[in-house]
Image: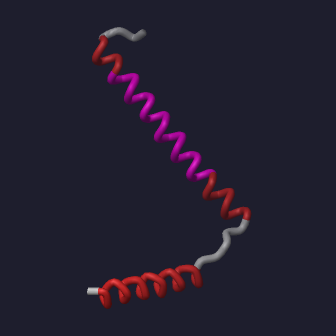
Amino acid sequence: MNLNIIGGIKNFIENSKRVMNISYKPTMEEFRKSSKVVLLGILLIGISGFVIGFIIYYIITGTLL
């Protein structure tokens, strides 16, 4: 059982090294593009959640405000 745990840890370390070797630091342009996409996604999810909540509130209460 201890050999399985040790083998699993060694395998994890080898896989982690492999990932670190093929990864790279993004350029500023890549960072800006990905930041814009993430921000847009968060904004869309927030707006859709607000609209759905507003619709549900309107259905439950039957009044607009």
**Dividing the picture into quarters, in which one does residue 60 lie?**
top left
From the image, which quarter does the C terminus lie in? top left
Residue 21 in the magenta stretch? The answer is no
Q: Is residue 12 left or right of residue 2?
A: right
Q: Is residue 20 above or below residue 65?
A: below
- Residue sitting nearer the eye, 54 or 6: 6
- Residue sitting nearer the eye, 36 or 21: 21
**Dividing the picture into quarters, in which one does residue 51 lie?**
top left
Residue 52 in the magenta stretch? The answer is yes
Name the dominant secondary structure of the magenta segment: helix
Extreme-right residue of the structure: 28
Q: Is residue 35 left or right of residue 48?
A: right
Q: Is residue 34 left or right of residue 27?
A: left
Residue 41: x and y, percent? 52, 47
Question: What residue appears at the point 29 percent right and 18 percent down from the top-left corner?
Answer: 59
Question: What residue appears at the point 46 percent right and 41 percent down from the top-left corner?
Answer: 45
Q: Is residue 60 above or below residue 21?
A: above
Question: What residue appears at the point 62 percent right and 51 percent down from the top-left corner?
Answer: 36
Extreme-left residue of the structure: 1
Residue 2: x and y, percent? 31, 87
Q: Which residues are magenta?
A: 36-56
What is the basis of the colouring in this image?
secondary structure
From the image, which quarter does the N terminus lie in? bottom left
Residue 18: x and y, percent? 52, 85
Q: Is residue 47 above or below residue 33?
A: above
Q: Is residue 35 left or right of residue 65?
A: right
Residue 24: x and y, percent? 64, 76
Marks counted in the figure total 0
